[in-house]
Structure formats: C-alpha cells, structure tokens
Amino acid sequence: MEADLVFDEMWADGTSIRRPYKNIKTWLDAEERNSLKAKRQDANDLFRLTGITFNVYGSEEGEERLIPFDIVPRVITANEWNKICKGLEQRVRAINAFLYDIYHDQEIVKAGVLPLEMLRNNPAFLLQMMGVNPPGQIYTHISGVDLIRTEENEFYVLEDNVRTPSGVSYMLENRETMLQMFPELFTKNRVQPIQNYPQELLYSLKNTLPDTAENKPNVCLLTPGPYNSAYFEHAFLADQMGIELVQGNDLKVVDGFLAMRTTQGHQKVDVVYKRLDDEFLDPLNFNEKSSLGVPGLFDVYRKGRVTIANAPGTGIADDKAMYSFMPEIVEFYSGEFPLLQNVPTWRCAIKDQLNYVLDNIHELVIKQVHGSGGYGMMIGPTATKKDIANFRRKLIATPQDYIAQPTLSLSTVPIFTNKGFAPRHVDLRPFVQMSPEKINIVPGGLTRVAMSKGSLVVNSSQGGGTKDTWVLEN
Amino acid sequence: MKKLNVTHKTKYSFEAGPLSGLQQIKKTPYSDACQTVLNWSLLLTGAKEELTFTDSFNNNVNLIRVEPGTKDLVIECEGHVEVMDKSGVLGYEASKIPLWLWTDYTNLTKPGSGIRKFAKGLPLKDDIGGFHKLMELISGSLDFQKNITNVKTTAEEAFKKGSGVCQDFTNIFIACCRLHGLPARYVSGFLLLENKQIQEAMHAWAEVFVEGLGWVGFDTANKISPDDRYIRVAIGRDYSDAAPIKGVTLGVQHECLSVSIMISEQ
C-alpha cells in the first residue's frame, strides 16, 4: 500500500497537526522518552496484574497473551462522533427490525430484496426462533460495529458483531490505565467519560424484562467457562455490573422458570446476559452434546419467562455474506439511505463475482463467511504465493463460504515504539446498547491497532493491540 | 364426522438406574380445520410438568422433569376429538413457518441415489393424482415390517432396505416431494383401526402443500388420504421434529418402552 494514500489521524497531510491532536502533540513533546518508556512498562505491568489476558485459540495449550497497549490516545471530535452515532443508531435499529422480520413474516424475502438463498441452509438461521417474541422485541441488546476510517470524513462499517460482541473490558481498562498513569491529561482535555458502561448495560438489560419479572429483577452473566478466550471479560463485566457470573450447571429450570443455584436455594433469573454460542445454549433444543448449556432454557425463553441477551439466532444478521446486503437491509427497514457506508463486497457464491475475485486475488481481502477474529482470512497484497494458491483452491471448491473486499487504506494513528513515534493502522469498535426505551452508545469504543509496520490485521488473536479512545466534549 | 375417544399410555423403564432430566412431550392434539379437540388430559407418574408451550410448528409441547430416582415413567393421555372427513384436505392455515422451509431436506429426508433414481421421472406437481401414484409406488417397493428400522433410520436407508414402518414410508414420501421442490411435512397422530383394539405405536403420514388447495394429507402406509379416523397431533420437517418424546437421556443405558393406545368411536 502506498503511504500517501493513508489518512493519518494526527498528521492529515503529513506536515501540520490535526486540531483534535494538538494537546496530545504538546504533551508528547514535553515528555521525556525514557519516562514514557517507563510509563509504558508500568501500564503493561498493571494489565498483567489485573489479569487482562487473552487466550489464543490454536496456540500452545493454555497460552495467555497480554494484549499490547499503546499509550498514545486516539482522539475523535464531538462532531465526528455525533455523525457516527446517527449512523450506528440507524444501522442497529435496522438490524433489530431485520431480525424480527426474519423470525416472523420474512417480508424482506417476499419483497425480493433479500434472496431466499441467504437463509436456506444457513447455519446461523435458527428455525426454533420462528415466531418467538423476545421481551421488548429486542434481539440486539449489545452490538459491536467495527468501523474503519479512510479519510477525514469517510467512515465505513467493516463488520457487524451482534452474536456476542466482545472487547468492552479492554476499552474500560485502557481508560482506567490512562487515568492512573497520566491523570493530568484528563484535566487538560475534556474527554467524555466511559466508566459508566457496566451500569448503563445493566440498566439497559433491566429495561428489557420478561413480563414475569418482579420488583427486583435478577440478571446473570452466562459464560462457557475459564477456557473461553474472553473469560476475563466475562468475570470483569459481571463484577463491574454487580451480577452473578454463572456457568450452565449453575442454572436450572425450576417450576417452569429459570433459576440459579445459590446458598439459599434456587433463585429465579429474569435476564441472562449470554456470552455463549447459540449452539451450546441448550442441549435439549440445540446441540445435544453440549455440556456448557442449560437444558430447557430455550423453552423458558419461548414461554416469555426470561430475557436472553443477545437473543438466540442473531448470528443470521452478522455473517459476512449477509453483510453485503446491509445497505439494502438498512434502507428496507428505515426507509432512509444508510448514513454509514459498507465496504464494497464481492459475493463469491455468484459466478461472475467469483471470477472477478480470482482474477484480482492479489489485491483483495478474502474472508470466510462464518469466520471471526481474523481466522480464515487472507490479505492479497501481503499474502505469500502459497497462501494465494491455497485460497484459490478453497474459493473454487466452496465459493459460497467466502466474500472478498478491496484492501482499504485504514487510517493510522501514531504509536509509541522503542524507536519513537510511528503510524500504525487502526479500526474502531463502538458498543451500542439497545432497550425498548432507547439506544445508548458509549463514547468511543475499542480502538484496535495493528502493531507491526504496514500491517492491516488488528485482531487481538493475531497480535493486534489497543489504545484508549477519546471522544472530546463539544 | 366421528367423535373419537383416545387413551394413550406409555411406560418408560430405566433399568440402568434412576434418571433425572427434562423431556419434551408432543402428545396433545390441537384443533384445526379437520378436527376439534373437545377435551384432553395428560397425566404423569414419576415426573412433573415444568411448563407448556407451542413451538414454531404450533405443536403443543409439555416440558416435564423426570423426578430423581424415578425408575418407571408413565405418561397417560386421554381425550375426545371430533374429526371431519375432508378427504385429507386441511387447507390453508396460519403458520409461523414459511413454505420454503418445508422444501429443505433434513438428515432423515435427504434423498440418496436410491430415492433419486426412483422419484426422478415422477410427475409430481399440483395434481393430486400424482401423489396417489407416489403412494402406490412407495408401497410397492416397501414391505411394512416392524423392527427392521428405528427412529434414526433415514428415508434413503429404509428405501434401500425395502422395508419399514409408517414413519419410514412417510419420510420417503416427503423426500420424493422435496426432490421435486414441493413443500412437504411429517404428521404424527392417531388412527382408528376397526380390527385392532390396542395399538403399540402412534401413526404417521405426510402432508404436501398443493397450490389452490393448501395442505393435503397422504398416508403412504395405507395408500389413502386421511379421513375422519385420523387425529393430527404434531407436525415437523421429519420424525425428529414431531417425535412424541424427546429428552436429555444422558447416562441412561436402557429404556424399555411399553405403549398401549386405544382409539374408539363414540
């Protein structure tokens, strides 16, 4: 990728500093290199101490990796943020309406906007959800919408995460660390606070109760357990929200309701904040081999006696093939043009598009439709000959499993390296909470950084790092 | 029109020791264009009811918990249903399931080379005659024989074996219809038999969606369309969706089953 095509959020044209970064520049200029190095070390020690680690799939058993943290904040202005928020709200409302439609009358298919083939034999489509009415008609209580920036005013949605979006604990810890290491920064800059996220999430979940909930609703977080890559986050969020962290065998159907085992016997559960894949949720209704789930939980759910957040079956809205229809989906349900753009996407299931992808494979990013976390993807311009040959074979064998996108020039933000400041590519995952009452978006979100020079892969499973993300007050 | 009285008693014995767990029971019929359920009761011994719900197919489901230490679970149903003879035409109905979902293969109804070859040239479309012909042909290639197949036998396996029971006949019929892109579904239910007082199993047949008529039933094992001797209980894409009992049976080695179904006309 040519350097002059990349938008740097600090040095837009390479010579003059962008306004929102002025204070950051002044701060960095005033700090001693060695003192910054020491503070960076302190920050990483702090992370290790708090236990913020990440289990990496497919690596040595039990390997826990520290996600690299960079001390240079990323800055977004109030104006920029307000625009992003409008786009996010429109998109998340549309996705929620889409899910309701898919699991009821499927008007979007009848209208010819979405081809039936997108649902047929799609493993993310849950037949059991047909006709189910989730409390408050909310499917996507939490969405993590991945955005990339290519220019001053160009933001694109890269991915919608509405199954079990993760990463919010890093967002919170990044801010906490910056507040501890550099308190003076927050007196000199008016940064919108994010520390209320867990309380706001709890409030939002308590606003989406089943009809059977009583005065003091009981919310719990259902985790697959310590072997899950996001277990730290599950424990962290449960602690911050002041709710119980439970595994499948802590929950049981009792007298027709969902209940939690406690030292005082069984206690009714009204809301399950689910951090477990649908497939493993309930062995009676889904994968019968699952020992992680709760037998009968889904039956209590369809009876309307418990809220599950996010609702089972939301995965149909965030697979990468469905992504390519998102502009049509947003327009169909909102009646408006999408405020946030999609990255142009080729659907390899379509013959002409597959041919284009095969002809231009060196310039494209190839992604697996049902993959996540940067697994099963290939970036054409940086791929080896072997990778390309490998993906070419896969594309020809099972084209329906892949989409392709142009390699967009993700914006860069400086990071602090041993050799000084250097630009690195970033993306942004804002977290959107939805309840019948309102949509709530925490200012900023999680900025992920590709730590090595020129790399476009920001996924933490692939060695990506994170930064504190500031949204300035107006 | 007939008024039928049904008693249906199932006993499960867990030889390997006590069982505890949840079971979904689909043994309660609902009223539709062909039948009116006058009354129905479900009595449990060795288990308690957690809740009842209607699933995505609109089936009535009882979620029950087998109590710890139970060695014999007994489920007794009793009720009266008024049935009309509509020559198998159920017609159009409100459904949570779109028609296209009934055209997708399932594990049990996926055709293999045997069924493909058999059904390929058949003139299956909107013509009722074609489906009666299909019933004849399936009956001609299959012997009705117990204990050759089980609930996990696929349509293709039963077809290759050349024998099976009503659920195999039905799964094969459904596979043939779906091969032609037609929406077809499985029905589990009761059938009044004149010469048989006590039956050991529920019955099964298929329904096909025919343009202009709606859903029409075909009982392949008996080569006729359902009449006023048939009570519909549960539907699904194949046997597994409509199974009378489905549960978590982890750790259970053997379960012996005795079933007695009595259907009489009042």
Image: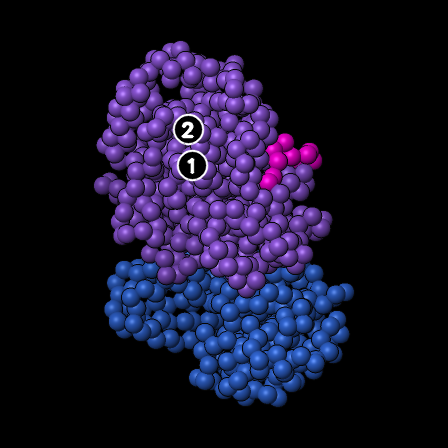
Chain colours: A purple, B blue
Specify the farthest residue to the top.
Answer: A188
**Relative vertical location of residue A151 with respect to residue A273 in this rendering, above or below:** above
Confirm whether the magenta stretch covers residue A337. yes
Residue A286 location (% of width, % of height): 44, 57
User: Do the residues at pointers 1 and 2 share their chain?
Assistant: yes
**The disc numbered 1 marks a residue on which chain?**
A
Q: Which mark is residue A422?
A: 2
Which numbered disc, 1 or 2, marks the residue that appears first in the sequence?
2
Q: Nearer the viewer, residue A259 or B157?
A: B157
Q: Residues within 10 Å of mark 2 (few under 14, many from 20)?
A: some
Residue B214 location (% of width, % of height): 71, 64
Confirm whether the magenta stretch covers residue A77. no
Compared across the picture, whether A79 is left or right of B123 comes to left
In which quadrant of the rendered view does residue A269 lie? top left
Q: Nearer the viewer, residue A102 or A179?
A: A179
Disc 1 to disc 2: CB gap under 8 Å: yes
Q: Residue at x 50, y 86 (%)?
A: B161
Q: Which mark is residue A453?
A: 1
